[in-house]
Amino acid sequence: MTYHSGSRAIQDRVGVRDLADHVGRAVGQGIRPVAAAFLELQPMLVVGAAAPGSATGAERDPDPAGGGVWASLLTGAPGFVRATGAHRISVAGGLPAGDPLTAALAAEGTAVGTIALDPRTRRRMRLNGRVRPGPRGFAVEAEQVFANCPKYLQKRETYETVAGRAAGVPRRGTELTPSQREFVEAADTFFLATVHPHGADASHRGGNPGFVHVDSPGRLSWRDYPGNSMFLSLGNLTADPRAGLLFLDWTSGRVLQLTGTARTEFTPDGGRTVRFTLAGAVETPAASPLRWSPPAYSPANPATP
């Protein structure tokens, strides 16, 4: 199933159903050799899923991770994520201590979305499926596999790995601190995790610094730039408003994970703005050992106001 009713509703509202059907033909279940070769070169993988726990209503788990949707970062030496079959990837290792998705990735059958993004080549690959835990990591049985165009993806030429340095202690909260606000507003990239009744998805959002607005300590917003017309993320939010955001400091390895709900506003001029309400935040210093070179911004990035 490439599209569900949520994605179809957005496609119809924007008037791109035919284009979405054309683009959707590229979505498959198999991992092609070129995709397998791409994966084996990557030092990082982003995964999105819902954490175990009550999702909505009065039964909500008091732990801010309970039932929330999160996006998490996994890193390793190239080859730590690889195709181990025509419909499976295997990921060696695990998440940093205290990550909200640790329990989800250890549970058989958890719906996950993954995205492997290479800033060096401005290529990305998405694979959605179900978790199969293992003794040294986990596997994902693929249900959707597809590539994206390089639009809004900043180019970073090189990276270095800082060896022997452990991640810092996670800091949890329910509102952004002043330093976290500065971090978000300076970001040129973030990752977005969403879910629907039959699965999960992880995607990339990019723009010039300032493209994400912090409207208050508990609210963020960003313009939804024109993309591939599939509307997987916005379609998921129509079906289930839970969302997870992942911000990465490419030079220090600092990671900020946010969970909450999001909704899409349509403006009279045909534009779209996504408004995110924060429920929980986890900031981890040096969560990533990767240190990337400065970016060359995508020429597709719209000017920020």
Image (cartoon, rainbow, N blue to C red):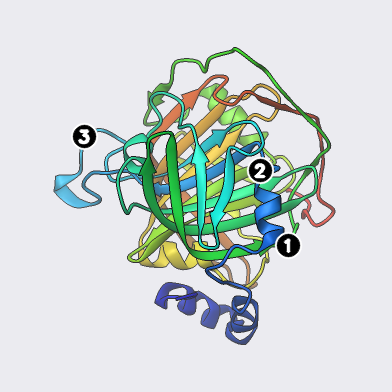
Q: Measuring 46% from the left and 26% from the top, which residue is drawn there?
A: 96
Give the number of the mark in front: 1 or 3. Answer: 1
Pick the residue in front: 261 or 83. 83
> Looking at the image, how many numbered discs can be counted on the residues?
3
Give how far apart the Cα atoms at labels 2 and 3 are: 30 Å
**Label 1 sits on residue:** 149
Mark 2 or mark 3: whose residue is earlier in sequence: 3
In the shown orientation, is residue 268 left or right of residue 49?
Answer: right
Residue count near mark 3 (Cα–Cα under 10 Å), binned few <14, some 14–19, many ≥20: few
Disc 3 residue type (three-letter):
Pro
Give how far apart the Cα atoms at labels 1 and 2 are: 15 Å
Toward the bottom, the furthest residue is: 18
Badge 2 vs badge 3, beta-carbon distance below 8 Å: no
Asked where in the image residue 159 lies, by quadrant, the reply is top right
Q: Is residue 163 above or below residue 72?
A: above
Residue count near mark 1 (Cα–Cα under 10 Å), binned few <14, some 14–19, many ≥20: few
Pick the residue in front: 298 or 167. 167
Disc 1 residue type (three-letter):
Cys
Give the number of the mark in front: 1 or 2. Answer: 1
| Labelled disc at residue 62 | 3
Q: Position of residue 27 (x, y in %)?
A: 58, 72
Q: Is residue 266 above or below residue 164?
A: below
Q: Secondary structure at mark 2?
A: strand
Q: Measuring 57% from the left and 20% from the top, which residue is drawn there?
A: 286
**Label 2 sits on residue:** 189
Q: Position of residue 260 (x, y in %)?
A: 38, 45
